[in-house]
Image (cartoon, helix red, strand yellow):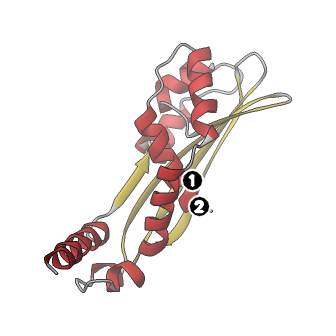
Amino acid sequence: MQMRYVLFASMAAFCLALSACSVTYGNKSVASPAAYGALVPGKSSKANVYDVLGQPSDAVTMKNGTLWTYRYRKAKNNFLGNVPLFGVNLIAGGKNGDVYTVLALFDRQGVLASRSAARQKLYTSNLASLKRSLDVMMEDNSSHQRVEMEMKKIDRPFDPSAAKDADLLEKSLD
C-alpha cells in the first residue's frame, strides 16, 4: 500500500517538473542572424562553420556534397501546462514556441556552397513530449553516427550530449 503512495508522489513530482519548465534545445547561435550571417558561401569551410555554429544536429552526405542541419528550439508552457493538478498539465498542457533552422550545404571539397535560415512556430503537447523522450532513450539514432563521422573528418570534437538534445528536438518536429 505504501509503495502505491510513493509511486503516486513520484509521478506527481515528475509531472510538475515536466510542466513547470520552458525548454530550449540546440545551439542558441542558430537563432542569431549575426552568427550564421558571418558564414560566406564559396569561402567558409566545414571547420569555419563548426567554429561559428558548433556541432550540427545532423549531417547528410549527398551526391554533390554534404548538408549540415542546425536547429534551436525555445518554448514555454501554454496556460494548461501550468495547471498544478496531477495529470491535467501532462494530458492537456503543452508548449508553444519557435524552432530556428539553419541549413549549410557544402560542396564535395567541404566549402560552403549555400546557407539558409528559417523560423517556424511549433506547439508540442506535454504527453507527446514525454513519449518522444522515452522513444529517444530506447532507439539508436543514425544521426549520431553521421555527425560523429563528420566531426572526425574535420578534426573537431563530437558532443554526445548535444547529439541527444538534437534527437529530442528532431522528434518534436515529426
Label 1 environment density (alpha carbons within 10 Å; few <14, some 14–19, many ≥20): some
Say if 117 sits above or below 93 in the image: above
- Which amino acid is tagged 1? Glu
Residue 68 appears left or right of 100: right
Residue 161: x and y in percent read: 41, 37
Residue 20 appears left or right of 165: left
Q: Can residue 45 be seen in the rendering of this structure?
A: yes
Residue 8: x and y in percent read: 22, 77
Distance Cα–Cα, label 2 vs label 1: 5 Å
Label 2 environment density (alpha carbons within 10 Å; few <14, some 14–19, many ≥20): few
Check whether the beta carbons of the residues at disc 2 and disc 1 lie within 8 A of each other. Answer: yes
Q: Can you tell which quarter of the image residue 62 is in?
A: top right
Q: Residue furthest right?
A: 63
Q: Can residue 32 be seen in the rendering of this structure?
A: no
Residue 96 appears left or right of 83: right
The N terminus: image quadrant: bottom left
Say if 74 sits above or below 141 in the image: below
Q: According to the image, label 2 marks what residue?
A: 173
Q: Residue furthest front?
A: 1
Secondary structure beneath label 2? loop
- Which amino acid is tagged 2? Leu
The C terminus: image quadrant: bottom right
Q: Which residue is drawn at 70% across and 20% down?
A: 111
Q: Residue at x 61, y 39 (%)?
A: 143
Q: According to the image, label 1 marks what residue?
A: 170
Q: Which residue is drawn at 55% across and 20% down?
A: 48
Q: Which residue is drawn at 41% across and 44% down?
A: 28
Secondary structure beneath label 1? helix
Q: Which mark is residue 7?
A: none
